[in-house]
Image (cartoon, grey):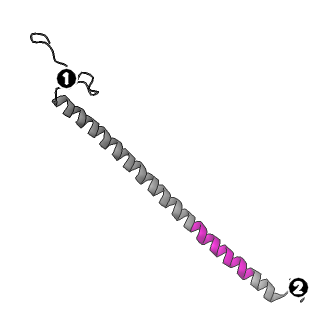
């Protein structure tokens, strides 16, 4: 079998068609890549928002727990409970 003649018009049109098909596929892949990057940015933003919300909820829960501990006899000004249960003597502040 003889190699194809590079000057053959059929061979040239086949290569041109392959090049066009590859260029079209490349453009589609680049567009898909842009879409995926945008989707990842959106997911990152949502993760950041959820993380901030969880931090606020934990802080609120900690403050609520500290307030509840304060109602149980702890010093309301002390959030770590270090003075819990301490009472001043009668007649003394």
Q: Is residue 46 above or below residue 74?
A: below
The circle drawn on residue 85 is 1
At 20% from the left and 25% from the top, the residue drawn is 74
Which quarter of the picture shows residue 86? Answer: top left
Judged from this view, the residue extending furthest toward the left is 91
Q: Which residue is mark 2?
A: 3
Query: Closer to us: mark 2 or mark 1?
Result: 1
At 13% from the left and 10% from the top, the residue drawn is 92
Q: Provide the residue span drawn in magenta.
A: 16-31
- The x, y position of residue 79, in whole percent, is 27, 28
Label 2 crowd (10 A; few <14 / some 14-19 / many >=20): few
Check if mark 2's residue and mark 1's residue have beta carbons within 8 Å: no
Which secondary structure, mark 2? Answer: loop
Query: Is the magenta region chiefly helix, strand or loop?
Result: helix
Left or right of 55 in this view: 26: right
Q: Front-most of 15 and 93?
A: 93
At 69% from the left and 78% from the top, the residue drawn is 20
Q: Is residue 30 magenta?
A: yes
At 23% from the left and 37% from the top, the residue drawn is 64
- The x, y position of residue 29, in whole percent, is 60, 69
Left or right of 35 in this view: 11: right
Mark 2 or mark 1: name the one nearer the start of the chain. 2
Q: Front-most of 10 and 67?
A: 67
Which quarter of the picture shows residue 25? Answer: bottom right
Q: What is the quadrant of the N terminus in the image?
A: bottom right
Which quarter of the picture shows residue 90? Answer: top left
């Amino acid at each position: 079998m003889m190699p194809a003649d590079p000057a053959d018009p059929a061979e040239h049109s086949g290569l041109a068609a392959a090049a066009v098909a590859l260029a079209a596929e490349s453009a589609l892949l680049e567009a898909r890549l842009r879409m995926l990057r945008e989707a990842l940015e959106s997911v990152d933003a949502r993760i950041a928002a959820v993380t901030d919300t969880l931090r606020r909820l934990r802080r609120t829960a900690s403050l609520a727990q500290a307030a509840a501990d304060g109602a149980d006899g702890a010093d309301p000004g002390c959030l770590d409970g270090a003075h819990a249960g301490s009472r001043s003597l009668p007649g003394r502040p």
